[in-house]
Amino acid sequence: MAYDRPSWREIDKMRDGGRVRKKRDNQIRDLSEHSTRYEKYKSDLNRLFDQGMASELVKKFGKDKPAAEDDARKRRRDAMRQPTADSKASLSRLKLIRAVLEAGDPAALVAAVDELSQRFGLPDEWEVLIRVLEHPGEALQEQAIDRMIALLPVSAKVPRRATLKERLRAVAQVAREAKLRDKARGLEERL
């Protein structure tokens, strides 16, 4: 039993004479027209540069810009290159935050947290506040818990929630002040 279905070539021939070949012919014709236009464009550009007209056009368009724009652009560029006092403070703040987050031993953590809180105060970053709970000073722990309570309604997601709960339990068990213990328990329950 022979297969009676026509091949794709036969189907294309039955259709309007094989559109694929017509498309290919049109593309070849378009390429030749395009290359002629492209050659004319290149010859016009070469003529422009050979006659020295390009430098005159550049000078002409360069004069149209007001000097104030150039001066403002230069000032902005120079300002971006030279760090200001704000950017230097921001860089040192970021370095201190990194030191708090990467502190391996308790002494390094205490030193980094103390310097950060004295120079810039506690930041509104959950990771840093969680690390501040490891600090032995109850005043800093209370500040961190207060900051967390303020951040909780605004935060969509609390990072390292299990770690935070453990640290809050530890603070609630070890803290001397009843006020700090109550705040730690309250925040733990809200999480």
Image (cartoon, rainbow, N blue to C red):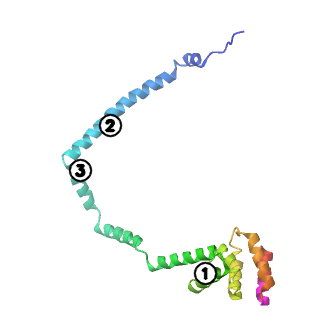
Q: Is mark 2 on a helix, strand or loop?
A: helix
What residue lies at 69% left-to-right and 83% top-to-bottom? 135
**Picture coordinates of residue 170 (x, y %)?**
78, 80
Q: What element carries label 3?
A: helix
Asked if residue 79 lies left or right of residue 40, the reply is right
Bounds of the magenta segment? 176-183
Who comes first in sequence, dot 2 or dot 3?
Answer: 2
Q: What residue type is labelled 1?
A: Ala
Front residue of 19/125: it is: 125
**Picture coordinates of residue 73 (x, y %)?**
35, 67
Q: What residue type is labelled 3?
A: Ala
Residue designated by label 3: 54
Quadrant where the N terminus sits is top right
Residue 179 is covered by the magenta coloring: yes
Residue designated by label 1: 112
Front residue of 22/161: it is: 161
Callouts 1 and 3 close, C-beta under 8 Å: no
